[in-house]
Amino acid sequence: MNKHLNDIEIFKISNQLLDDATQLVVFNQHLATCETCQLKVNEEKSFSKAIQSNLAVNDKIDVSEKVLSHFQTEIKPVFIDLKWTIYTSIIVAVIYMLSTIPNFIDVAFPKIENLNIFISAVFLILMVDVVVKYIRFKKMVH
Amino acid sequence: MEETDLIKGLQNKSHSAINYFVQLHQQFVFVLCVKMIHQREVAEEITQDVLIKCIKNINSFEGKSKLKTWVYSIAHHEVLNYLRKNKIPTTELMESIPIVDNEKNILDTFADKDMKLMIEHFFNQLPADQKELLILFYLNELSLKEIEAVTALSAANIRVKLFRARENFKSLLSEKDITLLNQIRYE
């Protein structure tokens, strides 16, 4: 490539706006040998930096409080929702049924060792969940 | 926080998600608004409106682009609406600004710190669409693809428009007049 790069080509290569790889290679080869175009590219890069530094906005804002307060009225903190109550009730009912089956069905039901410990563990998990939900609820309220 | 978690949080209107979303996006939306509108209070108000609108409409975010790009496109429309409502021209005004070949002087202008005010003044004289492209590209450092998604222009069109915007800005700067600087100072 013997002829000089035109203004728009200088602009594109300086600001990395070229998406054609072949063109990029050709331009770079030309720039390696042409001082005039190299100078123009450097000037263009300086111009870009100058735009960035001179027009930069140093003023910082924080609108988070205002945005949050806008949603304050819409957000209704929920301690325990309906879904949780239904699922928990089902789990408790199933556990109770399982524990009572051997009493009224006279079959060789597989005996679960330490059934009380198992049931207590499940209840403990449910209670921990309730506490976690309460803490989250408190955080949302305040 | 991952983008998917953030979106879920916003859908549930979680406080922490809203706060994180605002902290993440407020500054770059503000930069666009303040540079386009030139009034800090109005720019802050529009920034706030843009973020509220984004949170309210988070369910319409399809995930085709990055969340940041989507927020930007909403900001872009809000700013244009404001400019139209207030009858501030949004299309090209200067068709025939002569292209100058005096880059050295322009770089000197930038180097002079006293000229910052004047540079800002000349930047404000650019048509809104050109200004927006310069802000997106130079100040907020968006990629070509991101600008495409925000402005709905093609990549080729953006390249040409960016070039013209930059040439117009350069031409305006090269026509600088010291009396104008004094005028701005005593306004």
Image: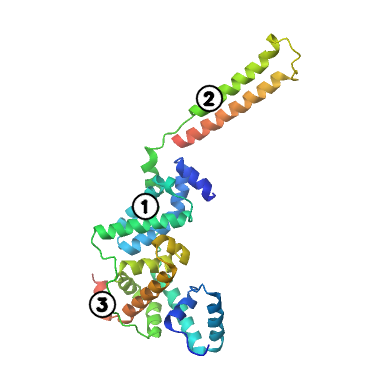
Q: In this view, does A73 lie above or below A80?
A: below
Secondary structure found at label 2: helix
Q: How crowded is mark 2: few (under 14 residues within 10 Å), some or many (20 or more)?
A: few
Q: Position of residue B65 (x, y in %)?
A: 48, 56
Tags 3 and 2 both on a single chain: no
Considering the numbered disc 1 on the image, is that residue within a helix, a strand or a loop?
Answer: helix
Q: In this view, does A20 lie above or below A62?
A: below
Q: How far apart are marks 3 and 2 (CA)?
A: 74 Å
- At a point 33% along the width and 78% down the height, the residue shown is B173
Q: Which residue is drawn at 44% across and 84% down?
A: A6
Looking at the rendered structure, the kind of residue marked 3 is: Leu
- Asked if residue A93 shows in the view, the reply is yes
Measured along the vertical axis of the image, is residue B44 above or below residue A11? above
Q: Distance between the residues labelled 2 and 1?
A: 39 Å
**Disc 2 designates what residue?**
A86
To which residue does mark 3 refer?
A: B180
Q: Mark 1 lies on which chain?
A: B
Percent x, y for residue B82? 28, 57
> Mark 3 packing: few (<14 Cα in 10 Å), some, or many (20+)?
few
Q: Who is closer to the viewer here, B34 or B145?
A: B145
- State the residue at coordinates (56%, 80%): A25
Q: Name the mark on residue B50.
A: 1
Amino acid marked by disc 2? Ile
Residues at discs 1 and 3 both on one chain: yes
x, y (%) of residue B33?
A: 35, 60
> Relative to B103, is A90 on the left or the right?
right
